[in-house]
Amino acid sequence: MEMDGNRTIAADRATVWAHLNNAETLKACIPGCTELSGSPEDGFEATVVQKVGPVKATFKGKVVLSNVVPGESYSITGEGKGGVAGFAKGGADVVLAEAVDGTELSYKVEAKVGGKIAQLGSRIINGFARKMADQFFDNFQAVVEGTDAEA
């Protein structure tokens, strides 16, 4: 499954970049994230609890950053295992550019799932993945712009 999109965030590129590399910001923005630790240099380890259709699972995984161009772009890849529920793995290319109202964040995501989750069908999986991406970027934009009460 592939998807892409972009957001204009009302903040300068340096601020957006700092948040993209901050474990606390990422934990607050990832739907269902209960733990996130690590650093951009060494990678992040995460625990995420999600329900996809009738399947609820706790995914534990690692995320690594590569092709890093500070202040401009990076590639993020990761894999999470949810026990009998299955696995999810994928990556995203994230690019920042100057915009009239702040910073334009563009992303291209590729993801794969397996196990029980994959048996739910592509319509459910694709809808869930789109919802997760939208929630992440809504949360990220709110935190960076300071409109989130917990920011």
Image (spheres, rainbow, N blue to C red):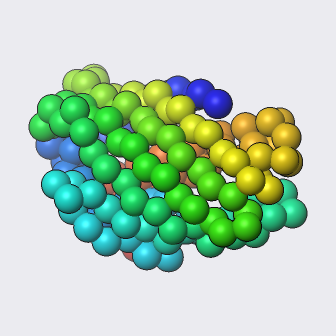
As rendered, which of 125 and 19 lies closer to the eye? 125
> Residue 93's quadrant in the figure?
top left
Q: Is residue 114 left or right of residue 98?
A: right
Q: Position of residue 121 (x, y in %)?
A: 85, 40
As rendered, which of 91 and 14 lies closer to the eye? 91
Q: Is residue 86 left or right of residue 11?
A: right
Which residue occupies 43% across, 30% down? 107
Q: Is residue 53 left or right of residue 125?
A: right
Which residue occupies 63% across, 66% down? 82
Above or below for 112 versus 36: above
Q: Residue furthest bottom?
A: 34
Above or below for 49 versus 99: below
Residue 138 visible somewhere in the drawing: no
> Residue 29's quadrant in the figure?
bottom left
Q: Is residue 32 left or right of residue 69?
A: right
Which residue occupies 43% across, 75% down? 35
Q: Which quadrant is home to the C terminus? A: bottom left
Which residue occupies 46% across, 62% down? 61
> Residue 148's quadrant in the figure?
bottom left
Q: Position of residue 128 (x, y in %)?
A: 72, 47
